[in-house]
């Protein structure tokens, strides 16, 4: 009875760990396990490396164009920050003028200026949110050609080695890969992507 309880507890812990993974990690694990099981069914004479692995982020950062994109994004961010600072300074100046003169303003003028300040504040908040969205979209658009080039380099190297799958090791998605059945593609993909 005790042995059965221990097995059930072990199964629950294993299930809990799997359910705690993100969907992407679960699919990565399922695909990797499927390929491993499929290829382990062959005889040892036919055994070869069929899984490649690399750090996608590390390889992406090593591309020469990545530094150019980062510089462009930094410049764009500085431009948005400068405009936001100008808008905040403008708001602060008007707010101080409002505070200085509110004792002397007739009620109607005070309400009008208070409304103007609220609208200006809301425009500044809207601008900040919109600039963050535009920065994210500009980054996505700028990185797209790099990601496509990297994907092509990965495919080229994988085909060269006759690999069935290439696993991204970022975010601890694959804590262990048997070296007898996998090959590290980091250096080769970096070399391939930097040729172009």
Image (spheres, helix red, strand yellow):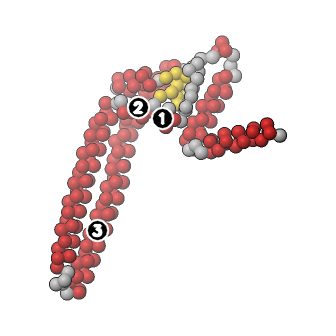
Q: SS for tag 3?
A: helix
x%, y% of residue 14? 66, 39
Q: Secondary structure at mark 1?
A: helix
* Inter-mark Cα distance, 1 to 2: 9 Å
Q: In the rendered image, which residue does mark 1 sit on?
A: 170
Instruction: Give the spatial CA distance, label 3 vs label 1.
Output: 41 Å
Residue 140 in view: yes
- Secondary structure at numbered mark 2: helix
Whether pointer 3 and pointer 1 mark residues with C-beta atoms closer than 8 Å, the reply is no
Q: Where, quadrant-wise, is the N terminus in this rendering?
A: top right
Residue in front for this viewpoint, 82 or 1: 1
- Crowding around mark 1 (Cα neighbors within 10 Å: few <14, some 14 to 19, many 20+) is some
**Mark 3 and mark 2 residues within 8 Å of each other at the beta carbon:** no
Image mark for residue 58:
2
Mark 1 or mark 2: which comes first in sequence? 2
| Residue located beneath label 3 in the image | 121
Q: Residue at x 17, y 79 (%)?
A: 101
Earlier in the chain: of badge 3 and badge 1, it is: 3
- State which quarter of the image contains the C terminus: top left
- Compared with 96, 40 (above or below) is above
Query: Mark 1 touching mark 2, by CB under 8 A?
Result: yes
């Amino acid at each position: 009875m005790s042995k059965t309880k221990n097995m059930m507890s072990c199964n629950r812990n294993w299930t809990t760990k799997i359910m705690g993974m993100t969907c992407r990690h679960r699919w990565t694990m399922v695909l990797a396990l499927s390929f491993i099981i499929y290829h382990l069914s062959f005889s040892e004479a036919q055994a070869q490396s069929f899984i490649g692995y690399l750090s996608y982020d590390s390889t992406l950062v090593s591309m020469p164009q990545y530094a150019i994109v980062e510089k462009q994004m930094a410049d764009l961010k500085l431009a948005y920050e400068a405009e936001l600072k100008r808008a905040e300074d403008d708001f602060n100046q008007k707010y101080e003028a409002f505070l200085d003169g509110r004792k002397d303003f007739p009620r109607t003028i005070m309400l009008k200026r208070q409304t103007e300040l609220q609208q200006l504040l809301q425009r500044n908040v809207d601008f900040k949110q919109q600039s963050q969205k535009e920065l994210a979209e500009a980054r996505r658009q700028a990185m797209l050609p790099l990601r496509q080039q990297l994907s092509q380099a990965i495919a080229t190297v994988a085909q060269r080695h006759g690999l069935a799958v290439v696993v991204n090791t970022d975010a601890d998605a694959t804590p262990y890969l048997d070296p007898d059945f996998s090959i590290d593609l980091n250096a080769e993909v970096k070399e391939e992507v930097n040729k172009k």
